[in-house]
Amino acid sequence: MARTPLTLDALRTTYGPHLNLAPPGGWDADPEPDRLVKTHCCFCGQQCGIQLKVKGNDVIGFEPWEDFPFNEGKLCPKGVKRYLQGNHPDRLTKALVRTEQGFQESEWAPAMDRVIQGIQDVQNKYGKDAFAVLSGVSMSNEKSYLTGKFARLGLGTRNLDYNGRLCMVSAGVANKKTFGIDRAGNSWADIEGAEVIWVQGSNIAECSPITTDYIWRARDRGAKLIMVDPRITPLGRTADLMLPLKPGSDLALTNAVLHLLNKWGMVDHAFLAAHTTGFEAALEAVKDCTPEWASELTGLPVAALEKAARMWGEAKTSFLLHARGIEHQSKGVENCLSAQNIVLATGRIGKPYCGYATITGQGNGQGGREQGHKCDQLPGNRDIENPEHRAHVCKVWGCKDEELPRKGLSAQEIMNAIHAGEIKGLLLLCFNPLVSLPDTEFTRAALSKLEFFVCLDFFLSESAQHADVVLPSALHEEDEGTSTSAEGRVIKLNKAVEPPGDARPDWAIQLEIAQRMGQGKFFDHLKGPEDIFNELRRASSGGTADYTGITWKRVEDEMGVFWPCPTEGHPGTPRLFEGGRFYHADGKAHLQPTPWRPAMEVVDADFPVWLTTGRTVFHFLSGTQTRRIGFLVEQCPHPYLEIHPKLAERFGIADGDPVEITSRRGAMVLPAKVVKTIRPDTVFVPYHWPGDLSVNRLTARHLDPQSKIPEFKVSACRIKKTTADQLSPELAELQRMAYEARTNQAVLPERVF
Amino acid sequence: MVSDEYGFFIDPQRCIGCKSCVGACAECGTHKGRPMIHLDEMDRLNSTQTAPTVCMHCEDPICAQVCPADAIKRSEDGVVHSSQKPRCIGCQNCELSCPFGVPIVFSGLEQMLKCDLCYDRTSEGHKPMCATVCPSQALLYVPKHEISAMRQNKPVREFTVGALKVKTRNALMVPDPDKPLHLDAALLLAEGGW
């Protein structure tokens, strides 16, 4: 029974989160480094270039890397302070094995023995597929690739998936359907000359801050910005047209835009005829999507919808960007397809300053979804159920078709199967599902049912607290490899320091387990990440995500190479679809019909308020790393409820008041942040925190039927003012930590006044 | 010497409130974890507007004028420096008098430290730390002659503070008065009943 072995307080005392406030040796230590290591940020999909200052075996700070072309030295606060995750008091440096008394530190060998025994016990008793692997896309391409091979050949399980399932998979499915390839259509350089930039469901200023400057550079040249979001975000504040729509109504907006483009004769019929199929069916699906109809669903005035369509229709060049806002819906795929339809209808793609992209959220969200650690995919973005694709990968891996498992369950489906008792064992890495999956208490119950649970992590994440064995893994700066940014640019991650204690890279741990499981014949030739990358290149060869021509050396020499890159002489492909050539067998883009349907949960008399969730600029995803860095916690210590004063007034809520928020899944209490920058029918909570403060206690396990992405962005809730004694003690602890970060004093002073 | 060719341009319109500038300022080799600049929310109830405050580097700095210990110096290149440690008496006159709210007398240190345009970096031809990392380039450090081609907003280097005229080395970027601002979100708020 994988319950947590200690109380929350006891876990916190030993494993944190504690704050790292200063570099090794403190601020008075000599700041001069021995060397600067050029690498990239460990956080979001922009993968900004950064130089780490290294002294001995410590990262002591950073220096901007102005020569790296994507960000030219720019960094968000997470990038500035990322180095403080090293030399951290919470860092795991020994294996942990659960006992009756809690976690005991263990030497590596006995811990590994227990891991092998645990996996074998589950698989012998319940079958290979009863042991699942859940991974993440903050991992390098090499680790992502190896994880796919490790799960399938090392463990022989089909049940492997990843937290990219919570990221951009809706866009991935849509990209494949429409374009026949799953990548951003353009490098960000094409943003700068676009006349109109359409941003839908993306809080760019906070979630991909460096992209802000690309958009402003376009605006300096006269570009107009259309922002679509239920909240007026920091970039939305300055937009030429801000469309604050109801959560879950994005499809109505883009369908109405296509309807109007057609009605007003703003469609590029020559382009559609030459380079696409399916326009008639797409049009048929929006024939009743008048602005009046869309106005009802979106809550936006007809004039605003018409203005947006006109701005979009009249532009000669444009760039459409979207992110989790439209993808985290039970119709996430259709939302992306509809956005692609308004791009294709104008023919503005595959040309300079004509672009389309999802802004990938996780560090290697792009690369991770190509290398085959997704339940339905093989390397090269191949389909695991396609016989030709299987044959290619079997050849590279040296296995027989019957040795290669078939399609397994997706991330949320794996958790559902654990809860249902169908999956009994789990290896978890680079994923903190107890914070990041919807319906937190369901996830907690599921993790408690596992018969054997091993976790690889560098901190004891909330999910790792449930594990039987935790193996200490390496930080980003303690390993080497490549990553693929939101643009599709393959970049090089360089090692700055050695991992401390017994910590070792995920790939080394996987290779050891595979060897111990008797599958060494598939893995023994891989001595390190460069070997893994070179095998990845062969495995990707001929696939849409073709890395064949990309070498580590090229990536460093050229400051990144854009895939597809099928030969070493190939320059890489910053802009896809040039000349109207798409990646389906017929060379055309395939527009898909996108008939309207509502969210899985809508507001009603019992739950009358829309709830939407998202991020803040100071934290990354489940917060395992950023909730341990002093400066970031100081700026944003805990979650809050963003609520419009009109809605607040109806419930007698003032700024700072404790509010009980209840959905069909659960309830939580948070302080109110009363702001006019959100729709009056909608509340917002950021999701980076665990336990009582996890807004995913309230979100639902409703999935998009195609992409299996949960509908994080649309829930129904009710709110009421409550009393301060209902606030979680966790909140007070986080406020104390913020005080500590500000003052370096660990204890809050008693109130004098 | 800091090159006279380069200018520092501050454009709050672009600010996204991320505090990268503040965090990076603290990381600068000579600052030892103390940020010399700050960033504020303007009116969070109504807007996400935030604004960074860095030293404007006045031509005739008021902080220096009011310093009873003559501890604050402006170098020939127009940079106003932190107080000189042996002279500073920590009286806070500079803090109270600065029209932009820049100098900070650090308790414990009992000395005024301030934004010195990252003198260690800019005197060697680099950008200041904050303007290097700023994701939206609300803080911009570029050759002065490039600004009019780069940005639609216009640089202002003269301010009236009470009866005082203040001229500064750094510039505040303001919208061009000849070009109307689009504020269609406000229109929506009115129509949508916000």
Image: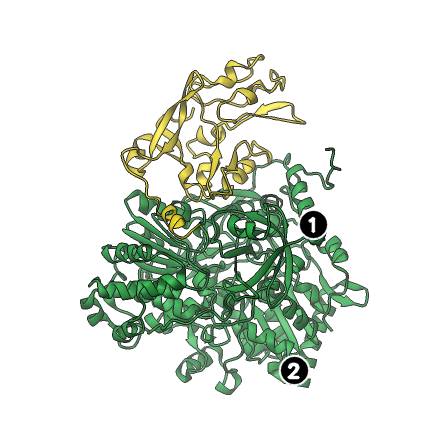
Is A730 placed left or right of B171 in the picture?
right
Q: Nearer the viewer, residue A739 or A303?
A: A303
- The residue identified by callout 2 is A123
Mark 2, chain letter?
A
Chain B in the picture: what colour? yellow
Tell me where residue A456 appears, x and y as whole percent.
Answer: 63, 65
Q: Name the residue carrying label 1.
A: A724
Mark 1 → mark 2, Cα distance in angstroms:
49 Å
Report helix, strand or loop for mark 1: helix
Determine which quarter of the picture holds residue A120: bottom right
Where does residue A150 sit, x and y in percent of width and height?
56, 74
In this rendering, does residue A150 appear at all? no
User: For the residue marked with disc 2, what is the amino acid?
Assistant: Gln
Q: Position of residue B120 (x, y in %)?
A: 49, 29
Give the label on residue A86, or none.
none
Image point (67%, 77%), residue name: A119
The kind of residue tagged 1 is Ala
Label 1 with label 2: CB-CB less than 8 Å: no
Residue B122 occupies which quadrant of the picture? Answer: top left
> Helix, strand, or loop for circle 2?
helix
Instruction: Please give the chain letter of the residue carrying mark 1.
Output: A
Q: Residue at x 47, y 67 (%)?
A: A329
Residue at left offset 42%, top offset 26%:
B2
Q: Is residue A392 above or below residue A482?
A: below
Residue A298 showing in the rendered view = yes
